[in-house]
Structures are given as structure tokens and as C-alpha cells.
């Protein structure tokens, strides 16, 4: 995968090898580079969604920090790694050339669909640190839950790893590659595996961290392609309502991104909505 580090002077790093085919990656760490990105993103098709998003950070939540915001633009086959650690609030207020688009307006636009996998932690961090009120969100974790078979329990959500294993349609070799890149990243940043989340703030990013950031969003369109065709009218409404509720709850005063209850879905075992007392 060609890796381009966009800087104010237009410099770029050498290409690096990843498992994401011909997908390109740009590391965005200046307002000038971000303006160019916004010019591009604002023109992309909305159906099907063009933007697949994830965030990385140090204890990513209202109690931690955001380091990187990844945006996969599928029509371009390109992933942008927005350097929030360096740009801080300017990342969300830098404007496109026509002055109409910022990263904040894009993330908050209900008319621009954006695909996440479990939006809650990302929403918590974005809202707490930068006042971003996410709208137009499609959550693949909820889409998977909502499209399970009638007699399959809907009490617990599946992890991204589980969804990739059973639904992404990868060959054994591709799944091994995906798992290997994931594990290399986890070894670097997961404290339980001897790593540190601070690796997301080291510049330049290591190849392993960069590849991890890219592959997390690179797999999401494959899951969309599996779950979206199964979304009937009733399921669409149910998942849309649950997604909006997750965003709202992630902004609430008592939300805790480390709560073990995050493994629970919004419905009971057979798909009926839980009341506040359940």
C-alpha cells in the first residue's frame, strides 16, 4: 500500500507494504493538507456510504485523549489518518477551500452517512473533548445484531474480530494476515500485553501502528456488504433508533466506556427493546 505523509511542503514518505492491496494512505498533520482532504470528501457519493471511520487514542474516552481519526473513502480507495494529537481542535474547524465544510460539519451532518463499528467510545471522546455531536451514523455492530436470525440470541453484541471471522468472507490466509496485523498492533498499545497507548502519539507513526489503523477501517466495507442487504424496513428503523440512542447515551453524564455492560445490546435475547429497568 503506498503510504503518503502529506506535509505543508508536500513531502512524502517511501511506500510501505501492507495487506490492503492497492489502497493508499495519507497522514494528515497540517491545516493545509486537511483543507485538501475536506475538498475531496465533500464531493463523494452518499449512497452507498463513502466514509468508514474509526478513532485511536490514549484511553480513548472522555477520560483519555484522541490521537488519530481514520477515514476510509471507498470511492478513492484511500485512507486518511487525521493527526488529532498534533492538530488538536483545529482538526475540526479547518475549512475546505469553499469555506463550506469542516470535519466537525461533516461528522455532524445527518445527510452524510458515516459508518462506524461500535460508535459509543468514539462518540464519547469526540463529544467530551471537541463538542462533536455525531449524526448520520450507521453502526455495523448494531447492524449485525439486528440482522441475526429469528431464533439467534440478540442479547450480546459481537466484537469486530468475531464479525470479521464469521462474516467478512476472508480466506484462511487473508484472515491470518488480518489477525497478524491486529495482534502486532495490540502488542504495541495494549497495556495488558505489555504495550502502551502512547504509541499512537509517537511521530512518525511506526509501520505497525499505521497498518493497524488502516486495516481496522479497511475491513468495514466488507461487513457493510454483508449486513446492509439484510436490513428490511422494520430492522432499518430498529437499528437506526438504537444507533441514535447509543450516540445520545455516550454523551450522557454517567456514560462509562469501560463498563462491562457495553457487551450488552439494546434489545433482549429475542430482539425486543429493553426498558430502563431491564
Image: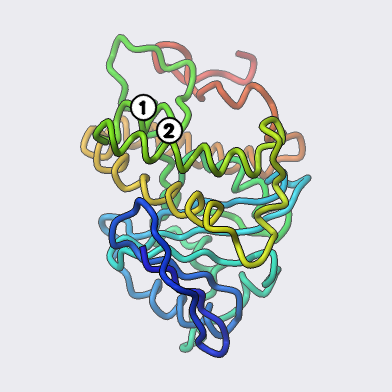
Q: Dot 2 surroundings within 10 Å: few (below 14), some, or many (20 or more)?
A: many
Residue 146, numbered circle? 1
Residues 85 and 120: in front is 85
Query: Can you give x and y, in whole percent of width and height, for residue 123 in the image?
Result: 60, 48
Residue 232 makes an appearance in the image: no
Please tell me which residue is depicted at 55% across the width and 37% down the height of the picture: 246
Q: As drawn, is 93 to the left or to the right of 12?
A: right
Estimate the spatial distance between the alpha carbons at disc 2 and disc 1, rounded to whole Å. Answer: 6 Å
Please tell me which residue is depicted at 46% across the width and 60% down the height of the picture: 71
Q: Dot 1 surroundings within 10 Å: few (below 14), some, or many (20 or more)?
A: many
Residues 169 and 221: in front is 169
- Image quadrant in which the N terminus is located: bottom left
Q: Are marks 2 and 1 in contact (CB under 8 Å)?
A: yes
Residue 63 makes an appearance in the image: yes
Query: Can you give x and y, in whole percent of width and height, for residue 118 in the image?
Result: 51, 38
Residue receiving disc 2: 142
Local SS, label 1: helix
In terms of image quadrants, where is residue 42? bottom left
Using the image, determine if residue 46 lies above or below residue 246: below
Q: As drawn, is 180 to the left or to the right of 108?
A: left
Please tell me which residue is depicted at 25% across the width and 42% down the height of the picture: 225
Amino acid at each position: 500500500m503506498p503510504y503518503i505523509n502529506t506535509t505543508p511542503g508536500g513531502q512524502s514518505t517511501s511506500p510501505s507494504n501492507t495487506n490492503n492491496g492497492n489502497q493508499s494512505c495519507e497522514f494528515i498533520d497540517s491545516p493545509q493538507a486537511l483543507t485538501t482532504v475536506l475538498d475531496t470528501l465533500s464531493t463523494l457519493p452518499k449512497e452507498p456510504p463513502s466514509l468508514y471511520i474509526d478513532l485511536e487514542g490514549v484511553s480513548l474516552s472522555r477520560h483519555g485523549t484522541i490521537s488519530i481519526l481514520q477515514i476510509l473513502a471507498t470511492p478513492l480507495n484511500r485512507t486518511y489518518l487525521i493527526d488529532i494529537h498534533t492538530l488538536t481542535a483545529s482538526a475540526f474547524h479547518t475549512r475546505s477551500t469553499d469555506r463550506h465544510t469542516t470535519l466537525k460539519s461533516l461528522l455532524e451532518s445527518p445527510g452524510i452517512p458515516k459508518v462506524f463499528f461500535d460508535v459509543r467510545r468514539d462518540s464519547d471522546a469526540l463529544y467530551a473533548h471537541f463538542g462533536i455531536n455525531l449524526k448520520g451514523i450507521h453502526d455495523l455492530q448494531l447492524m449485525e445484531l439486528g440482522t441475526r436470525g429469528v431464533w439467534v440470541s440478540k442479547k450480546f453484541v459481537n466484537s469486530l474480530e468475531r464479525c470479521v471471522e464469521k462474516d467478512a468472507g476472508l480466506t484462511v490466509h487473508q484472515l491470518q494476515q488480518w489477525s497478524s496485523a491486529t495482534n502486532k498492533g495490540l502488542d504495541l498499545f495494549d497495556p495488558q500485553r505489555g504495550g502502551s497507548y502512547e504509541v499512537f502519539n509517537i511521530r512518525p507513526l511506526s509501520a505497525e501502528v499505521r497498518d493497524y489503523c488502516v486495516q481496522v477501517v479497511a475491513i468495514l466495507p466488507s461487513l457493510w456488504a454483508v449486513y446492509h442487504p439484510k436490513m428490511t424496513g422494520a430492522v432499518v428503523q430498529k437499528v437506526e433508533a438504537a444507533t441514535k440512542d447509543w450516540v445520545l447515551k455516550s454523551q450522557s453524564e454517567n456514560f462509562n466506556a469501560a463498563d462491562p455492560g457495553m457487551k450488552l445490546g439494546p434489545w433482549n435475547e429475542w430482539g425486543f427493546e429493553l426498558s430502563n429497568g431491564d
